[in-house]
Amino acid sequence: MTNRNYHLVIVGYGGMGSYHGKLLKENQNINVVGTYDILEERRAASLADGYKVYESLAAVLADDSVDFVLIATPNDVHKEIAVAALNAKKHVICEKPVTIYSEELIEIMQAAKMNDRAFIVHQNRRWDEDFLTIKKVYDDLIIGDVFHIESRVQGANGIPGDWRHQKAYGGGMLLDWGVHLLDQLLFMIDSKITSVYANLSYILGNEVDDGFQVFITFENGITSLVEVGTTNFIQLPRWYAKGTTGTAVIHDWDINGKIVKQNRGVEVEAPKPIKAGQGLTKTMAPPSEKAVSTSDLPKVDKTMESFYDNVISLVEGKAEPIIKNEEVLRVLQLMETIFKSAETNEVVKDFDRVMDGKILF
Ligand code: NAD
């Protein structure tokens, strides 16, 4: 039986706010009772979609029947709305990037603790099938111990939207897409970061980055490259991982890709030299047929508790959050480090050791 006993108001009824509205239509526990947006046209859209329109944030916060505030505004106002909502004893779900600066998140975490209310960031790409697939390859040692991993998203359409072009709103691709890819990487690799080196691109002439590359090294020896581009007319694979016994590639969000593994214990012929440009090579020749086997990517378990179900389990004290605020904070601090590395053109060493002290409050 449907028992939608939690009332939620969406603050910021733009692209993502309305998407949450659609997703929550199917939810058994949460009822979207209204929205608040500063723009008249978005209020009209909310009314057309059947939601009550609140006249101000204060009106939302004064409504005792509201349990949750979901923040889907541009990034610069996440903190002030979150802190006000927590102080009004609401639980808060917030879009990513949670804030522009890590100090703002620390303030929010303090407000959540003080008011004994839940604060959860919508890092929804932890549920993406491409990510769960590479995570399974990694966790189950399908290509042996992974020692290098590359995660990329590349488009050819420039920076999207309007406010994403401006620094003051928390624009730029590091904050927009980088936060997802870095969150996935740090969620997958349970090891301290030893070095960070990054460059940001400004090819399109905006005041914010239109892409970036960051090289991250972990204490367990894994090296990684995370890359976002908005001027790529040809795309490289979404994921590429090298392990001690094989290589995995995932080309796209439809999970096209493969695993190629070295055959152990089989006597194989040495590769035959091939003509390579103006020379010959044996080193770069394809392995002989018996030397490797190709297989499909593993299937992933899709029964993981959904984002919203986990939110409800959390507020009812039945589960730990899948997305922990301390993890979100680490990603924000990593992005600050990436900006620093790109600005100074320097490798930042011992990221986690330096940051540890700041996480505690
Ligand atoms: P958008 O511009 O489409 O919508 C933002 C809405 O917020 C607009 O309607 C605007 O009028 C409203 N708004 C601005 N300031 C406000 C305020 N002070 N109070 C109330 N409403 C206000 O932007 P979007 O693409 O929907 O992005 C919104 C947030 O969602 C951003 O933080 C973005 O990073 C995030 N987002 C997340 C995902 C994801 O996959 N998790 C995808 C897209 C966007």
Image (cartoon, grey):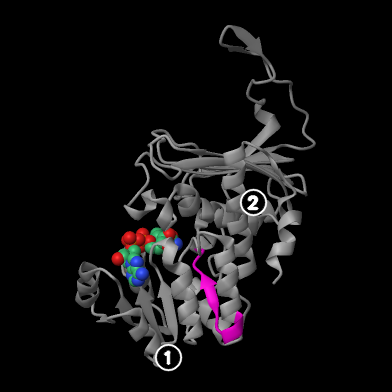
Q: Amino acid at mark 1?
A: Asn
In this picture, residue 280 sits left or right of residue 124? right
Which numbered disc covers residue 38?
Answer: none
Q: Residue furthest top?
A: 278
Q: Amino acid at mark 2?
A: Val
Q: Quadrant of residue 168?
A: bottom left
Residue 230, visible in the rendered structure: yes
In x, y percent, where is residue 47?
21, 77
Ligand 1 under 8 Å from disc 2 Cβ: no
Magenta region: 113-123
Q: Is residue 114 magenta?
A: yes
Question: Which quadrant of the render holds ligand 1?
Answer: bottom left
Kindly state the secondary structure of the residue where label 1 is placed.
loop
Choose between 148 and 134: the one closer to the eye. Answer: 148
In x, y percent, where is residue 139?
69, 56
Q: Earlier in the sequence, mark 2 or mark 1?
A: 1
Ligand 1 under 8 Å from disc 1 Cβ: no
In x, y percent, where is residue 123?
51, 63
The quarter of the image holding the N terminus is bottom left
The quarter of the image holding the C terminus is bottom right
Kindly state the secondary structure of the residue where label 2 is placed.
helix
Q: Residue at x 77, y 33 (%)?
A: 266
Residue 214, visible in the rendered structure: no
Do residues under tags 2 and 1 come within 8 Å of each other at their CB atoms?
no
> Which residue position is annotated with label 2?
137
Q: Quadrant of residue 158?
A: top left
In x, y percent, where is residue 257?
52, 43
Cα distance between the residues tagged 2 and 1 = 39 Å
Q: Residue at x 59, y 74 (%)?
A: 109
> Which residue position is annotated with label 1?
5
Choose between 108 and 151: the one closer to the eye. Answer: 108
